[in-house]
């Protein structure tokens, strides 16, 4: 039986992954902002077979509360061996471009990168000390290269247009690089660090985006996360076909790439 901490547990991908853990009768501790939603998720996971499910509500941008949350999770589970970090935001790029401090850019970087670093610092130290465990963190293919994005979005008025999201990509790129360093640091302590790189996923966060052939369901990504944790992978693209896509994108020469609408 694994003892699993899921941070960002109300996200669609995290919920789908938690259901797979519950079916294996693992013990779970859930963290998210919405207490009512956490309560409903916890009740569902118990029905699905989870050995134990506890939860706490927390705004993950309150960095000073991270250590106490970790202590609470450890006490509830009587130990900790697996962590899944799945929270994040997809902010409006145009708003981020207008002002760093008073618009969205700082908040996007804080939520998608700095909050994860804050969480991983005590988590990594704890697992390193006990000499076993697995940390899985959801990054994104958007972090593989600074680029425009061909997302198509719909506004409330029904308009459609293109949205570049290189601020989001910056945060995810920094996160992927941080995880690579952490993975190398923790390898001698028998702690694996899995970087999860989903492509387009049909979730409430992308509800206004036009969907196409490359879009995946949260359940598909969840199965990939479950397998990656079980096999102690280093890094995985989900679904798998994003690996060749991003390999091509990474190798396009910059003089050509900056003229492309990718």
Image (cartoon, rainbow, N blue to C red):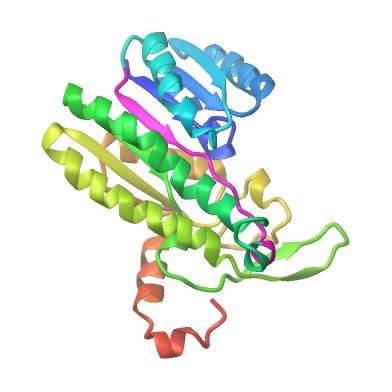
Q: Position of residue 252 (x, y in %)?
A: 38, 82
Residue lying at 38% horizontally and 22% vertically, measured from the top left: 4
Image point (83%, 67%), residue name: 159
Q: Is residue 63 left or right of residue 181?
A: right
Taking 183 as reference, is 257 above or below it? below
* Residue 133 can be seen in this image: no
Hey, which quadrant is residue 21 in on the image? top left
* As drawn, 117 above or below 131: below
Q: From the top left corner, tell me how far across and down residue 65 is, in percent.
A: 49, 25
Q: Where residue 149 sits in the image (x, y, percent)?
A: 57, 70
Relative to 248, residue 23 above or below:
above
Q: Is residue 88 magenta?
A: yes
Residue 189 seen in the figure = yes
Q: Is residue 251 in the magenta section?
A: no
Q: Point out the residue furthest to the front here.
A: 101
Image quadrant assignment for residue 208? bottom right
Can you give x and y, in whole percent of width and height, for residue 3 in the image? Answer: 35, 18
Residue displayed at 47% across by 39% down: 222
**Callout count:** 0
Magenta segment, which residues?
Answer: 80-95
Q: Is residue 41 left or right of residue 252?
A: right
**Image quarter for residue 161?**
bottom right
For the view shown, which residue lies furthest in the right direction?
Answer: 157
**Quadrant placement of the N terminus:** top left
In this view, 248 is above or below 181: below
């Amino acid at each position: 039986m694994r003892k699993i901490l899921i941070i960002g547990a109300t996200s669609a991908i995290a919920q789908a992954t938690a259901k797979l853990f519950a079916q294996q009768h693992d013990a779970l501790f859930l963290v998210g902002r919405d207490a009512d939603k956490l309560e409903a998720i916890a009740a569902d996971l118990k029905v699905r077979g989870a050995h134990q499910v506890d939860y706490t509500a927390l705004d993950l941008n309150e960095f000073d509360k991270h250590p106490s949350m970790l202590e609470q999770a450890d006490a509830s589970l009587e130990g900790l061996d697996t962590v899944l970090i799945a929270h994040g935001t997809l902010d409006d790029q145009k708003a981020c471009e207008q002002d760093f401090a008073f618009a969205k850019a700082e908040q996007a970087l804080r939520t998608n990168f700095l909050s994860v670093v804050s969480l991983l610092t005590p988590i990594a130290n704890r697992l390193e000390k006990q000499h076993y465990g697995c940390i899985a963190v959801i990054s994104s293919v958007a972090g593989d290269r600074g680029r425009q994005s061909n997302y198509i979005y719909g506004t409330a008025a029904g308009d459609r247009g293109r949205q570049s999201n290189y601020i989001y990509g910056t945060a995810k790129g920094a996160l992927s690089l941080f995880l690579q360093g952490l993975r190398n640091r923790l390898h001698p302590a028998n702690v694996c660090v899995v970087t999860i790189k989903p492509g387009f996923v049909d979730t409430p966060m992308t509800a206004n985006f036009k969907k196409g052939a490359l879009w995946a369901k949260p359940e598909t990504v969840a199965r990939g996360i479950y397998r990656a944790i079980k096999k102690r992978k280093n890094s995985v693209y989900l679904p798998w076909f994003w690996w060749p896509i991003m390999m091509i994108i990474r190798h396009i020469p910059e003089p050509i790439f900056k003229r492309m609408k990718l």
